[in-house]
Image (cartoon, rainbow, N blue to C red):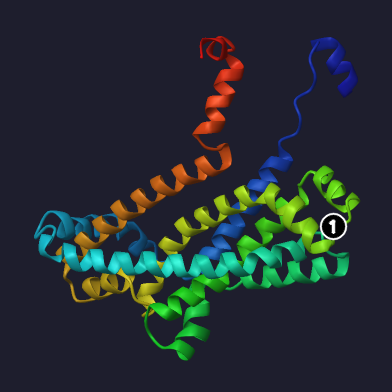
Amino acid sequence: MTAATAVRSTGRPVPPSRLRRYVALLGLAAVIVWAAVGIDVDLDKLLRLPSGVLLIAQRMFVDPGLDVTYFETAMVGMLQSIEIAWVGTVIAAILSLPIGFVAAKNVSSGPISNAIRVLLDAIRAFPELVLAVAIFIPIAGLGPVAGALAIGIHSIGTLGKLTAEVIEGIDTGPVEAARSVGGNTLQVHRWAVLPQVLPEIIAFWLYRFEINIRGAAVLGVVGAGGIGFLLQQTVVYGRFGKAGMALVVVIVATILVDTVSGWVRRRIIEGGGTRRVIEAELEQPELLTAT
């Protein structure tokens, strides 16, 4: 019986073959096994991992528990990590804005835009850890300066790409209006392009600052200062109570920064209170007659 005959006789189509699905799943399993063998995964250690994590957590938070006396030291380290992230974000914001304009295809020529995008891709290919260990720690030495430079340079790749994409999505009306009244290239960019994209770009800067705080904490492990350095030292020497206190400070500070940064981003994108009052009055005309 052919497929067409089967359809006419049963009144429903023949279910598709599952061979492709099985082949895809088999290929995925083969890739996972190949990767696991390549990194020499020890199944016995992997099975003991949950109990090891629970043991470390118990030493940090139960026995002997948090070392409250370490709170001030942990706060100083966390503030240094925030400062590293802030300086790195400022460096990236200042440099990525003009680079983003050049990378935007509707602003610069095709070859130049493509070359700048390749450069941004190359910058993003190197993590902060690699930049810090291979370049900035040998140049600036151990400490927060190397961490701030590594974070700043790495963030240029992401912020430059996002800036270019935002610029490519602008409304061309203001640009044409600025050109029609005789504005040169810089004037068009300043008065027709920048006001359209700046709120969203600033929101990207703030979001990148949140990410850089986590990056600054990790960079401390390789000697770039901040809370990561304190965590590395306390864990290496078995001072789990102090390490637990440092972890609590990291978690609380990260949540607070994310909350404040998210609120600021929403205010920038959605507008301030005056705009909301005007929108409310437009939706309820009786408020206008009442005043």
Can you say which quadrant of the picture contains the N terminus?
top right
Q: Is residue 85 left or right of residue 191?
A: left
Q: Is residue 165 above or below residue 243?
A: above
Q: Position of residue 224 (x, y in %)?
A: 38, 78
Tag 1: residue type? Gly
Q: What residue do we see at 88% from left, 53% from top?
A: 179
Q: Is residue 208 left or right of residue 191?
A: left
Q: What residue do we see at 56% from left, 31% from top?
A: 275
Q: Is residue 3 above or below residue 269?
A: above
Front-most of 78 and 128? 78
Residue sitting farthest toward the front:
291
Q: To which quarter of the image does residue 63 belong?
A: bottom left
Q: What residue do we see at 83% from left, 49% from top?
A: 175
Front-most of 84 and 267? 267
The residue beneath circle 1 is: 183
Q: Secondary structure at mark 1?
A: loop
Judge whether residue 159 can be spotted in this image.
Answer: yes
Q: How many marks?
A: 1
Q: Position of residue 269 (x, y in %)?
A: 57, 41
Q: Position of residue 272 (x, y in %)?
A: 52, 37
Q: What residue do we see at 69% from left, 66% from top?
A: 98
Q: Position of residue 143 (x, y in %)?
A: 37, 81
